[in-house]
Amino acid sequence: MTDLTRRHLLTGAAAIGAAAVTGLQPTTANASVPPSGTQAPGFYRYKVGSYECTSINDGARTFPMPDKFVVNVPKDEALAAGEAAYMPKGMVTVPFNPQLINTGSKLVLIDTGNGVANFEASKGAVGRMLQNLQAAGVDPKNIDVVLLSHLHPDHTNGIRLADGALAFPNAEIMVPGKDWEFWTSEDNAAKAESNPMMKNYFANVKKTFAGLESKVTKYEWGKEVAPGITSIATPGHTPGHTSFAVASGDAKVLIQSDVTNIPEFFLRNPDWHVMFDTDAAMAQATRHKFYDMAAAEKATVIGFHFTFPSVGHVEKDGAKYRLIPSAWNPTI
């Protein structure tokens, strides 16, 4: 057992001093290697039956908490939740994690992240999905389907490269029909003129999908949208917001998309309303319905805004819920 008493430490120090007096030098390590200054690639593989799935990290954005980040509680209460989760004081951190599903017959990317154009602007904080996809050994040209859960920028902007070219040139782009109808409506866009955030969302959809209308396939809820992947109605965050059940054999996971934004706030407090929700009351009801189901089924849940690698389980805790992250598995 290592002896960390004061006597032991003083004896050791005396020995080093004696070595110096007699000319003997204690052995030292060579620490001349400079720090790398870069982060490791962010991808994590997990199995669902025979399907190999990969959580692809697009980064995480840390920013000062807006006054109305949580719309229906005092900011002090929201700040306390952030501090309880050990976020930087006065700040909030939002991670981004698209999912890649290899069904054996199709390579399906669920959501695309913030896009490489945001990589430089954020100093590498976000827009990392393509480089992490390539680090995972996946050529973007081999993606068969880009399956979008909804049309917010952090889920769609990765469709294009910085020069506007398609990041996944051979992929079918699938979007929820209800979201497409809402965000491409000129009437809805006109009504949003007075809301800067919503105005930006409408403009971003128009810019991102310009010229792609013929490549877009609209899907419905409750349907198999790709092999083993079924769309689940989870509206509120947006009118057509969609989650997915991925099933292979007897195994299943739930990809919850944005049923909750960061779980430390909105899964723990399902009645809190995040500023990004189009219909906050509906999103609140959806959270309870979805998490009651996930908890009852003891289902593995994958969250776009969960801390990487974004895999865990949801448990009921009275009227609230808590996320139990899954242990990192070194094998697949």
Image: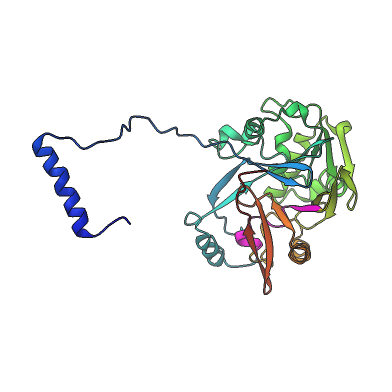
Classify residue 288 by image quadrant: bottom right
One can see residue 327 in this view:
yes
The percent coordinates of residue 295 (x first, y second) are 73, 65
Q: Which residue is nearer to you in this view: 273 or 184?
A: 273
Residue 332: horizontal and vertical position, in percent?
68, 43
Give residue 62's position: percent from left, percent from top: 54, 48
In this view, the residue farthest toward the left is 21
Which quadrant of the rendered structure holds the N terminus? bottom left
Q: Nearer the viewer, residue 300 or 35?
A: 300
| Residue found farthest to the bottom | 318
Structure colour scheme? rainbow
Which residue is depicted at the point 55% across and 55% down? 65
Q: Is residue 229 left or right of residue 10?
A: right
Relative height, residue 66 to residue 297 (above, below): above
What's the magenta region?
A: 251-267
Q: Residue at x 78, y 32 (%)?
A: 143
Image spot of residue 107 (x, y percent): 79, 35
Q: Is residue 223 above or below residue 20?
A: below
Question: Does 40 appear in magenta?
Answer: no
Q: Residue at 19%, 49% (x, y): give it.
A: 12
